[in-house]
Each structure stands twice: as structure tokens, then as C-alpha cells.
Image (cartoon, helix red, strand yellow):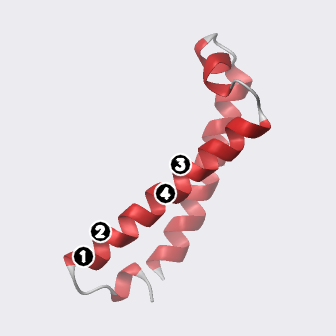
Amino acid sequence: MSLRASTSVTEIVIWGAATIAVQLLVFRITDMLLKGLPERINEGEVAAAALLVGAKLGVALILAAAVGG
């Protein structure tokens, strides 16, 4: 079943919550791999920010394809 087959607002909200949960999980995993990621980004380290953006965009594309059916 995918978002395309969802027929109620409840199902759409569940899909939205699931995708947000996965995005947050990816952030936590990336943060664990790169210790102090938020601090490094706040200090202006562009490479850490670019890696986080790349991870989030990659996961977002995969989720969009999976949820869209």
C-alpha cells in the first residue's frame, strides 16, 4: 500500500508521521557517525552541513519514491 492508494486523511497523516520519523532517524544516525554535528554546523563547518543535507535529500528521494508507489 502506498500514499497513492490512501483514501482517508488518517492514512495520509500516518504516512506523513512515518516519513518524518524516518527523516529524524537519519539525522540521529548521521549525528552519531559524526560526533557533535550540530555544533560543527554552528561553528561554520560547511562539509558537515553538506553531508547532512546530502543524507537528508537522499533519504527524502527514496521516501518519495517509496511512499508515492
Residue at mark 4 to residue at mark 1: CA–CA distance: 16 Å
The residue that disc 3 covers is 24
Q: Is residue 43 positioned above or below 22 on the image?
A: above
Give me the C-alpha separation between circle 4 and circle 2. 12 Å
Q: Secondary structure at mark 4?
A: helix
Total number of numbered labels? Answer: 4
Q: Position of residue 48 (x, y in %)?
A: 71, 27
Question: Disc 1 to disc 2, how far (Cα)?
Answer: 5 Å
The amino acid type, in three-letter code, at marker 2 is Val
| Kind of residue at badge 3 | Leu
At a point 78% along the width and 39% down the height, the residue shown is 33
Q: Dot 1: within a 10 Å radius of its alpha carbon, few (fewer than 14), some, or many (20 or more) residues?
A: few
Mark 4 vs 1, N-terminal side: 1
Q: Nearer the viewer, residue 41 or 58?
A: 41
Q: Position of residue 17 (x, y in %)?
A: 39, 62
**Direction left: furthest residue:** 9
The residue singled out by tag 4 in the image is: 21
In the image: residue 48, left or right of residue 16: right
User: Label 4 near label 3: C-beta < 8 Å?
Assistant: yes
Q: Relative to 28, does residue 66 appear above or below in the rendering?
A: below
Residue indicated by mark 1: 10
Density class for disc 4 (Cα within 10 Å; few <14, some 14-19, many ≥20) is few
Q: Secondary structure at mark 1?
A: helix
In the drawing, what numbered circle is on residue 13?
A: 2
